[in-house]
Amino acid sequence: MAVRQTIKSERNLLKRKDLLVEAIKVCPKDPVVNFMYGYSLERLRKYEDALNHYLIAAELDKNYADAFSGMGDIYMVLGNVDSAVAAYEKGLALDGKDKRTARSLELAQIKLKAQSGGAIKANDFVNVMKNSKTPAENAIGSVEGPLLRMLIIFPDESAELSDDAKDQLSLVVGRALLSPALADAHFEIGGHTDAGGNSKANMEMSRGRAQAVKDYLVDNFNINPERLQVAAYGDSRPVMPNDSSANRNMNRRVEFKRLK
């Protein structure tokens, strides 16, 4: 199709977007044009609009593997790991030779397991932090790139690490930070709470919990404290609605984000 070739040959991102705007008007039911427009919007960080066109492309052509993989990428940026895993699985089922999607699925599955309270290994932590794309300024709530949400267990209204939390930090995070692959890496340890209590108290609680995690890693694994930066977010960034015990548990978390 001539219009597709014209768009593909245009290297300027903004000019390509303009061409795609016109192409969508002429060919609104073309799955490839919708996919290309979605990809262009994704590169411009218009994530919701990009997702919409990936969804249209997949609806128009239910065997369009790239459209499902694109949806997975957007869901990761928007922080919806469950949907990302489902989209990557569909894309890989349609194109089993797509190594990039296979790798994206592997990392998304690790992240989903970690944020759901499942047991991950030190090597999983290393793989996410080592092989994810370079950190970027993403939308709030994004799980794209070198970031892991972990359910580090604390007693109610306490910043003291539970025995389970200490085991989790020892078996996973401490070992991972000693890995040669992460020897020079720096991380933010972000504390998060559910919406119970008042925001000021939640902010202080999240800071105390993040600091407790840092102190444990420094004291027990001799990690250089300059590699670990503490951040407090309180209840400002929930990953789930605070409408059930299970959801509140997921919001009470510690996030590890690679800074460099």
Image (cartoon, rainbow, N blue to C red):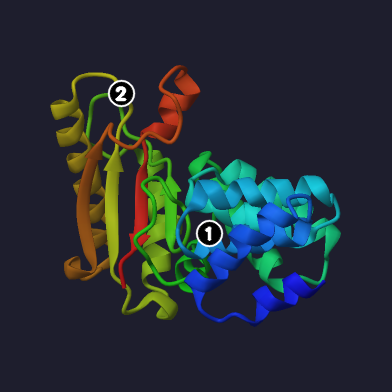
Structural distance between the alpha carbons of marks 2 and 1: 34 Å
Residue 208, percent across and down? 18, 41
The image quadrant where one finds the C terminus is bottom left
Mark 2 is surrounded, within 10 Å at the Cα level, by few (under 14), some (14 to 19) or many (20 or more) other residues, namely some
Residue type of the residue flagged with mark 2? Ala
Q: Is residue 31 above or below residue 206?
A: below
In screen coordinates, is 156 left or right of 168? Answer: left
Q: Which residue is mark 1?
A: 41
In the foreground, 21 or 79: 21
In screen coordinates, is 43 left or right of 217? Answer: right
Residue occupying image coordinates x 39% and y 75%? 182
Between discs 2 and 1, the one toward the N terminus: 1
Disc number placed over residue 71 in the picture, else none: none
In screen coordinates, is 90 left or right of 217? Answer: right
SS under mark 2: loop
Residue occupying image coordinates x 47% and y 17%? 244
Residue 81, percent across and down? 56, 46
- Viewer can see residue 193: yes
Residue 237, percent across and down? 33, 37
SS under mark 1: helix
- Viewer can see residue 88: no
Residue type of the residue flagged with mark 1? Leu
Residue occupying image coordinates x 30% and y 32%? 193
Residue 150, percent across and down? 43, 46
The image quadrant where one finds the N terminus is bottom right
Q: Which residue is mark 2?
A: 195
In the foreground, 217 or 130: 130
